[in-house]
Image (tube, helix red, strand yellow):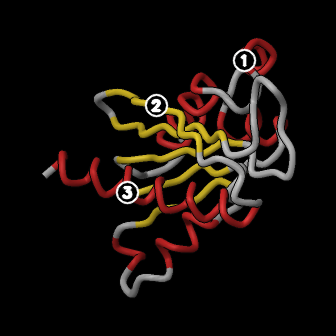
Amino acid sequence: MLTCAESCTGGMVGAALTDLAGSSAMFDRGFITYSNAAKIQMLGVLPATLAAHGAVSIQVAREMAQGALERSDAALAVSITGIAGPGGSEHKPEGRVCFAIAQTTGVIAETQEFGAPGRDGVRQAATDHALNLLRNALHKME
């Protein structure tokens, strides 16, 4: 079973997974946690982590994925948090997206820089990347 914790993609990964016929056999639930309060309340992200690193960080992506795994019946979780734009900052530019994959064996996380193709472009690139991360993790589990 799969679960996802999404911020900047706003449910696009869950929607892509449930577009597949028979998805109820592999998709448990999705968490859309756009605000910091939602990340804390629904996924157990620590306020201290948010304060120290910000919502768009490897640390928060890790805690989101771990929280989704712990709060679901899934064996594999993916999380996404990023700057879809428009805008960003010198330290966190538009197109920066952090991902994590959580399993009972641990959590791996990474950051991707998609540039500034516009809000829709960043969100679609992040969705596609998250689906690829899930696919790769599933192949490793076989």
Left or right? Give the position of 52 relative to 111: right
From the viewer's side, name the closer residue of 86 and 108: 86
Dot 2: element: strand
Q: Is residue 32 left or right of residue 134?
A: right
* Alpha-carbon span between mark 1 and mark 2: 14 Å
Counting from the top left corner in percent of width and height, residue 82 is at: 69, 42
User: Which residue is tagged 2?
Assistant: 109
Residue 25 location, x and y as percent? 34, 73
Q: Earlier in the sequence, mark 3 or mark 1?
A: 1
Please state the horizontal and vertical placement of residue 3, each as a whole percent of the image: 48, 54
Q: Amino acid at mark 2?
A: Ala
The vertical placement of 64 against 25, above or below, is above
Gap between marks 2 and 3 measured at Cα: 14 Å
Query: 82 left or right of 64?
Result: right
Task: Tell me the residue that label 3 is attached to.
Answer: 132
> Residue 127: which quarter of the image?
bottom right
User: Is residue 71 rendered to the left or right of residue 120?
Assistant: left
Q: Nearer the viewer, residue 9 or 25?
A: 9
Residue ID for mark 1: 53
Q: Residues within 10 Å of mark 1 (few under 14, many from 20)?
A: few
Identify whether 93 is placed above or below 17: above
